[in-house]
Amino acid sequence: MSSAPATTFRWLIFVVMAIAFAAAWTVAFSFTQRTMPWLALLAAVDAIVALRLLGMPRGARGAVACGLFVTIAVALASLSIAAISVGGPAGFGLLESLSRLSPALAWELVRLANGLPQLLVYVVAVELAAWWGYGR
């Protein structure tokens, strides 16, 4: 396997791991009915572990990758939690709820569910992930 496909495969796995973390966050919400914003800090740790396990570069690229990991996890989890909150009581599954949720309603639900403390936790998680991803 040449270097370019291997690198592309690593980045693909890295993004899939971010999506998987968002899915786990959504499952945790479905059991507890709490948004648990502290899981963003755990996503930062998971981003670093994924970066190291996949042998991806540190430095500026690693910092950006880890920051995007947390951003993807937070965004997808927030969107999924909004969809479950609306569609769950109506008996819809996640995919059906996502397909029926308008962007305006999704944004409003995410905005209402996340106040300033939650947003600060998300920003701190992205910053920590980027700082750890930069690493020496």
Image (cartoon, rainbow, N blue to C red):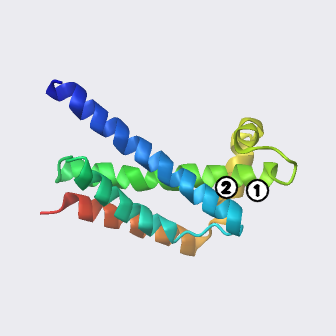
For residue 53, side relative to residue 17 (left or right) = left
- The vertical placement of 12 against 39, above or below, is above
Q: CA distance from mark 2 to mark 1?
A: 6 Å
Kindly identify which residue carries mark 1.
85
Q: Amino acid at mark 1?
A: Ser
Residue lying at the far front of the rendered structure: 1
**Residue sitting at 29 percent across and 50 percent down?**
64
The percent coordinates of residue 7 (x first, y second) are: 23, 34
Q: Amino acid at mark 2?
A: Ile
| Quarter placement of the N terminus | top left
The crowd level at tag 2 (other Cα within 10 Å; few <14, some 14-19, many 20+) is many
**Residue sitting at 23 percent across and 55 percent down?**
52
Q: Secondary structure at mark 1?
A: helix
Is residue 57 visible in the rendered structure shown here? yes
**Residue sitting at 45 percent across and 53 percent down?**
71
For residue 55, side relative to residue 15 (left or right) = left
The percent coordinates of residue 113 (x first, y second) are: 68, 64
Question: In the rendered structure, are the residues bearing label 2 and label 1 in contact, judged by CB atoms less than 8 Å apart?
Answer: yes
Residue lying at the far right of the rendered structure: 90
Kindly identify which residue carries mark 2.
81
- The vertical placement of 83 against 33, above or below, is above
The quadrant in which residue 44 appears is bottom left
The percent coordinates of residue 103 (x first, y second) are: 69, 41
**Residue sitting at 25 percent across and 47 percent down?**
54
